Image (cartoon, helix red, strand yellow):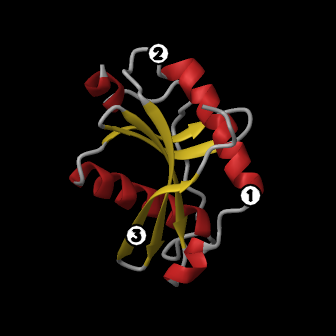
Amino acid sequence: MVAALKYSPCPAQTKESFPRAANTSVPTSYQKGVDAEKHVAFFLERHGYDVLCKRYKTSVGEIDIVAFKDNILHIVEVKNRKLLHQARVAISEKQKARLAQAAELFLAESAQNLAIEGVQMDAVFVAGTTIYHLERAWDPVDSF
């Protein structure tokens, strides 16, 4: 079932449009974030993760990447900044709570056929060409 999910869009996924600045050669911060998420998805796949979906939208927020490895569901937040230490402090407590709620919705809507033994909240920080994956970046708020 993992392979089937890997190649199909998430239920809430729609075709993406990329807003550009007036000078189309300069990507917007939105586009930079989307590009960082694509690089992180590739990074995770190279490290043995099955990327189930990207940009999973729910009523409470968006999950950047949902990945699966060793029967653990990884809810991945991607932060792209010029400097790595700026990225590391960019996830607020409010955002962590929203991600936990979004993860619950993902589990209810899309993960029935996965043999999930646990859920893990990860953060991946991108600065230039550096990617830093912090597993178990925080504990979900007693949700799982």
Q: Quadrant of residue 132?
A: bottom left
Q: Position of residue 74 (x, y in %)?
A: 45, 42
Q: Amino acid at mark 3?
A: Tyr
Above or below, comparing residue 60 to residue 44 in the picture: above
Crowding near the residue tagged with mark 3, few <14, some 14–19, many ≥20 C-alpha atoms within 10 Å: some
What residue is disc 3 on? 132
Marked residue nearer the N-terminal end (2 or 3): 2
What is the crowding at mark 1: few (fewer than 14 residues within 10 Å), some, or many (at least 20)?
few
For label 2, the residue is: 112
Whether pointer 2 and pointer 3 mark residues with C-beta atoms closer than 8 Å, the reply is no
Left/right placement of residue 9 relative to residue 85 reads left
Q: Are marks 3 and 1 in contact (CB under 8 Å)?
A: no
What's the mark number on residue 107? none
Dot 2 surroundings within 10 Å: few (below 14), some, or many (20 or more)? Answer: few
At a point 34% along the width and 31% down the height, the residue shown is: 71
Residues under numbered marks 2 and 1 in contact, where contact means CB atoms less than 8 Å apart: no
Q: Which residue is mark 1?
A: 93
User: Label 1 amino acid?
Assistant: Glu
Query: Which numbered disc, 2 or 1, marks the residue that appears first in the sequence?
Result: 1
Q: Residue at x 38, y 70 (%)?
A: 131
**In the image shown, does 9 or 28 lie closer to the viewer?**
9
Residue 134: give x, y in percent of width and height.
Answer: 45, 62
Instruction: Specify whether 124 is left or right of 102.
Output: left
Residue 144 x, y percent position in the rendering? 60, 31
Seen at 72% across and 44% down, the residue is 98
Distance (Cα) linking label 2 and label 3? 30 Å
Q: Quadrant of the N terminus?
A: top left
